[in-house]
Image (cartoon, grey):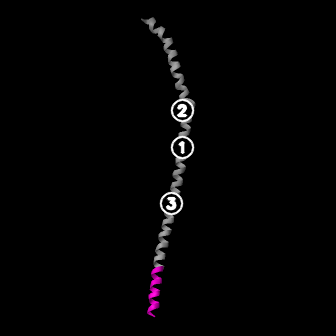
Amino acid sequence: MSRYEKLSSQIDKVITNLDKSKMQLLKDISMVDELYDKNLEYHKELEYYIVAGELKVQEIKDKLIPEMKLKPKHQATLLMHRRPMIMHNF
């Protein structure tokens, strides 16, 4: 009988260890799911920043750079028109 009691005791220990392992696995699965959701949210947010950056680059290429290329020509023209006025005032 003692042999069966020892076996029963060992089986109880195995069951206890399996239950603990099961609980830990469930916690780990829950944590991985949460991390996955947060990572997905972060990825979507990052996509918004990438798109915003690409739009800004396109705006700079399409609008700001051409405007800045025109400014020196425009400023030079203004200076040429002002120069006679400045000389005339002396």
- In three-dimensional space, the C-alpha distance between marks 1 and 3, rounded to whole angstroms, equals 24 Å
Under circle 3, the secondary element is helix
Q: Is residue 81 above or below residue 54?
A: above
| Callouts 1 and 3 close, C-beta under 8 Å | no
The vertical placement of 28 against 79, above or below, is below
Furthest toward the bottom, the residue is 1
**Lateral position of residue 21 relative to residue 63, left or right:** left
Label 3 crowd (10 A; few <14 / some 14-19 / many >=20)? few
Q: CA distance from mark 2 to mark 3?
A: 39 Å
Residue at horizontal 54%, vertical 41%? 52
Percent coordinates x, y for residue 8 in the rendering: 47, 87
Please give the range of residues in magenta.
Answer: 1-14
On the image, the x and y values in percent for residue 35 come to 50, 58
> Upstream in the sequence, badge 2 or badge 3?
3
Q: Earlier in the sequence, mark 1 or mark 3?
A: 3
Residue pointed to by mark 3? 34
What residue sits right under mark 1 in the picture? Answer: 50
**Residue 47 within the magenta-colored segment of the rendering:** no
CA distance for labels 2 and 1: 15 Å
Mark in the foreground, 1 or 3? 1
Q: Are marks 2 and 3 in contact (CB under 8 Å)?
A: no
